[in-house]
Image (cartoon, rainbow, N blue to C red):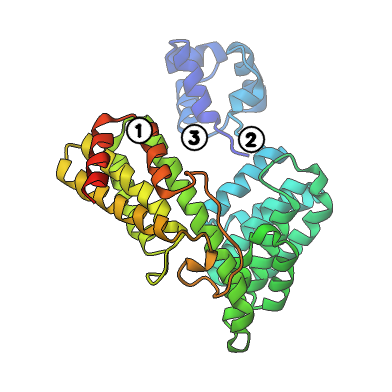
Amino acid sequence: MEIKLAESIRTFRKERSLTQEQLAEVLGVTVGAVYKWEAGLSTPELPLIVEMADFFDTSIDVLLGYILKDNRIDATARRLRHCQRVKDLNGLEEAEKALKKYPNSFIIVYRSAMLYQALGLYKRDNAKLRRALELLEKARPLLHQNTNPRISEQTLYVAMAEISQDLEDDERALEIFRQHNTDGLYSDSIGMILAKDAKRVQEALPYLSESLLIHEAALVRTVMGYLNLFLNSRDYAQAQALLAWALPIFTAMPRPECTSFMDKINSVFYLFQAHVMFKTGQPEEARTSAEEAHRLAVRFDAAPSYAADTIRFAMPGEDSTVNDDLGETAAQAAQNALKQMDDPQTTTLWQEVCGAR
């Protein structure tokens, strides 16, 4: 709590266009007394504070200028979240006070845990990390209070696994990650932990391979989403920058010695790049991109393969396959992409490239 009486007296007096002399006359005090009040050099007696509040038609607490910390649960949780973001060590004191005041509030316990985790990592302080782990355990039975859709039981367990890793309790981390590894969601973390142990590298490989395929597929979908966004917004400069960044990554994904479904996907991306090059006034570069799109399409259609192990670093013998909705063949995928573009210039170029081969 902070009191700003001096500032309040000065503000209220000026709002009523009164001089210090005029206020002093109203209250029956000297001008010097009013000056000292406004300068913070002295404080008026309580009866005078009551009289001023009445004169200024306000309440005593407003006149005193109380700045009350909002101690409601949500406001406290927001402050703890802010302390977590800025790595404010002073937040720990508020967290402990809040935990005493609201010991059975999920959001207070959870935010305090996250603050301890952030500061524990920041300061490399295992005591803080252990406190975070303790609070997460306490938060679990309180989860029914949660109203934030981004926080779930899985959120708590994963945070516990991450903290266990930081405390070098890899077995505990592995146990938690494995229990919650639905659809390979934490295969990357499992594989990373196992690969640190020279005796367990073969155990790590299936997890790392699964994670690689999951994240590469996600990246392809994300880039296609951004590409559609930029094209529909007619932001061709951003579309060009996106493809310039993504295509070197995508073309490095397949094993060079075999045909891969990525050849088909990359053929479509190169055709879109040709379209974008036309839109940005680069016809020669458009032709180069179209020619590469055609080369990859022909390569794929000659020996199509959707096997996951055609991707570099994927586990040899990986028996999963990949599906796409681009078209039955790479040639059909190109036609579907051209329909989406609805650009006669790119369509004509594609026909020329296909006819020249």
Direction bottom: furthest residue: 199
Going from N to C along the chain, the mark reached first, 3 or 2, is 3
Residue 329, x across and y down, in percent: 45, 48
Residue 29, x across and y down, in percent: 53, 19
Crowd tier of the residue under label 3, counting other residues whose Cα lies within 10 Å: few below 14, some 14–19, many 20 or above:
few
- Which image quadrant is residue 232 in? top left
Looking at the image, which residue is at 23% across and 39% down? 349
Q: Label 2: which residue?
A: 68
Crowd tier of the residue under label 2, counting other residues whose Cα lies within 10 Å: few below 14, some 14–19, many 20 or above:
few
- Which image quadrant is residue 337 in? top left
Q: Secondary structure at mark 2?
A: loop
Three-letter code for the amino acid on which mark 3 is drawn: Gly
In front: mark 3 or mark 1?
Answer: 1
Q: Label 3: which residue?
A: 40
| Whether residue 169 can be seen here | no
Q: Label 1: which residue?
A: 341
Q: Secondary structure at mark 3?
A: loop
In front: mark 1 or mark 2?
Answer: 1
Q: Distance of mark 1 from mark 2, alpha carbons?
A: 59 Å
- Which image quadrant is residue 72 in? top right
Question: Does 15 appear above or below 212?
Answer: above
Q: Distance of mark 3 from mark 1, alpha carbons?
A: 71 Å
Looking at the image, which residue is at 38% across and 47% down? 268
Looking at the image, which residue is at 68% across and 67% down? 161
Question: Does 35 appear above or below 227?
Answer: above
Give the side of residue 75 with respect to residue 38, left or right. right
Three-letter code for the amino acid on which mark 1 is drawn: Met
Q: Distance of mark 3 from mark 2, alpha carbons?
A: 20 Å
Going from N to C along the chain, the mark reached first, 3 or 1, is 3
Three-letter code for the amino acid on which mark 2 is drawn: Leu
| Whether residue 79 can be seen here | yes
